[in-house]
Image: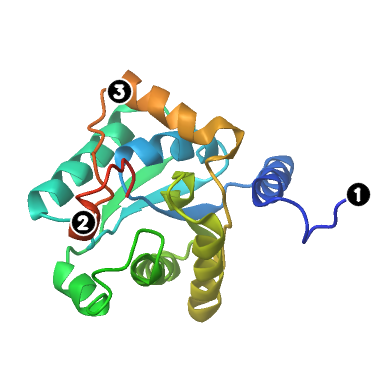
Amino acid sequence: MKSQTQMPVHKKMDRLLLEIKENNRCPKLLLHSCCAPCSSYVLEYLSPYFEIFDFYYNPNIGPKTEYEARSRELERLIKEMPLPGKVHFLEGVYEPEKYYELVKGYEQCPERGERCGICFKMRLAKSAQMAKELSCDYFATTLTISPLKDEKVLNEIGMQMGEKYGVTYLPSDFKKKGGYQRSIVLSKEYDLYRQSFCGCVFSKGGNHEES
């Protein structure tokens, strides 16, 4: 039998959700969301167990019209999607200048390279801070649903930010158990705007659909 440390991340999460259900608890979760399509399945999966504060903080997304389009779609999804638990929409400050300053010198890095790691750290740090301010029990990110994102890197950064700000990070791999495919189905069902690039200007030349 696999030990707890060897157990896949998505199975660890299932075990935690079962414990929450058995204990009749409803902890608060700060969920960093990159966009509505990625959030759709994650909200469906987690809302039976948590009161969710869905935090849209993505200064990497540009131009501003693209950022605003994604924000509106996420807010619309939360209003229209019948979810069993409470879900609150929160929008962070749009500060692209901070993103460009942090990734200066890494503009030519390939996708999944150092620039992406810097971007993850910026967004997860702010998410951990917000989770702390809201007295949330956990925080997590929808980014691990993307086949183009390295969930190991994301979870490592999330754990670091959790330790730094004193909030428990919820490791995830939301693309498992058909999560990514389910997000595509839900996106069609709710007629969600599904972007054609990652979000930052450096990825716009590629063929991506996640943030």
Measure how far apart labels 2 and 3 are at the Cα level. Answer: 22 Å
Residue at 33% over, 69% down: 115
- Residue at 85 percent of width and 52 percent of height: 2
Measured from the top left, where is residue 53 in percent x and y? 39, 51
Mark 3 vs 1, N-terminal side: 1
Residue under label 1, please give it.
1
Residue 169 rendering spot, x and y as whole percentages: 55, 63
Residue 199 spot, x, y in % from top left:
24, 52
Residue 61 image label: 2
- Contact between marks 2 and 3 (CB within 8 A): the answer is no
Tell me, yes or no, if residue 12 can be seen here.
yes
**Circle 1: is it few (<14), some (14-19), or many (20+) Cα within 10 Å?**
few
The local crowd at label 3, few if under 14, some if 14 to 19, many if 20 or more residues have their Cα within 10 Å, is some
Spatial CA span between label 1 and label 2: 43 Å
Q: Which mark is residue 190?
A: 3
Name the secondary structure under disc 1: loop
SS state under label 3: loop
Amino acid carrying label 2: it is: Ile
